[in-house]
Image (cartoon, grey):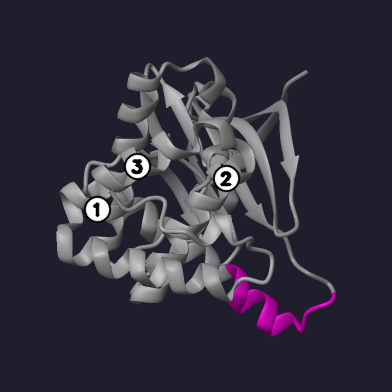
Amino acid sequence: MEEEVVFAYGPERRIETRRMVVLKNDRWIGAEAIVQRIEFLGIDAVAKWRFPKPWMPKELDEEFRARRTYVEAKALMRALSLGIPVPQLLYVDDRCGLLVESFVEGVLLRDAVPKLGDDELCSICRELGTYLAGLHGAGVVHGDPTTSNVVLSNGVPHLIDFGLAELNATLDDLAIDVHIFFRSVESTHRDRENIMKRCFVEGYRSIAGEERTHLVLLRVERIRRFGRYVSDREVKMEWSF
């Protein structure tokens, strides 16, 4: 069942109205935000609203929600400027914690991995490596580059959900981004782990260069060795080829 949302606008908010948003059935509620599938000005879209946190001081909460929304929008725009396949930013109001972006139709890489052949899987992971290296070169980290945040749309991997993105990233930030991808592969796709890591690094290296990639991977190793949950097998530099 769909529900229309009508916005009034014009001088002194006259009765002049227009249907801007149609709510659809798909809705996800997380710890920080409600994500709602919508139709926005006729476009299939997703709205993310970072709702107020009653346990936080009001001013701090407002500042946090505004900053996270602003950074997410900025990161999306930088990714788009680099030609990286991501959702199109349609609307943002950081004061309200609201962001609207185009909906990417497709299947999550997480669900597609078991059905993909080695060559196709390698090609996709190599592309993801180029995406992350491109973002990192622009000072942006995705923040949660797992296989659950990659949508295969017409065979092309798209990065989604920049909700944990950061700007002006440090080397540690870059390494954590790569580490998160590796951990998602190890925990969800262990039987395809080696090919996914190897191809990802190949793609990353093709953009970042040998020296930069080496520095990032060294920092990844250090981060992983500090992790209390990591076994000896998992901290090996299996991705160095």
Residue at 38%, 72% in the rendered image: 219
Element class at badge 2: helix
Name the amino acid type tagged 1. Gly
Q: Quadrant of the N terminus?
A: top right
- Which residue bears the numbered disc 2? 186
Return the disc, 2 or 3, that comes first in the chain's sequence.
2
Give the image location of residue 34, x and y in percent: 71, 48
- Which residue bears the numbered disc 1? 134
Label 3 environment density (alpha carbons within 10 Å; few <14, some 14–19, many ≥20): some
- State whether residue 8 appears in this view: no
56 with respect to 154 (left or right): right
Residue 198 bears which disc, if any? 3
**Does the magenta-highlighted stretch encompass residue 12?**
no
Element class at badge 1: helix
Residue 224 bears which disc, if any? none
Give the image location of residue 104, x and y in percent: 47, 28
**Span of residues in magenta:** 55-65
99 with respect to 177 (left or right): right
Distance of label 1 from label 3 (alpha carbons): 18 Å
Looking at this view, name the residue that lies furthest to the front.
232
Residue at 74%, 66% in the rendered image: 52
Distance of label 2 from label 3 (alpha carbons): 13 Å
Distance of label 1 from label 2 (alpha carbons): 23 Å
Name the amino acid type tagged 3. Arg
Element class at badge 3: helix
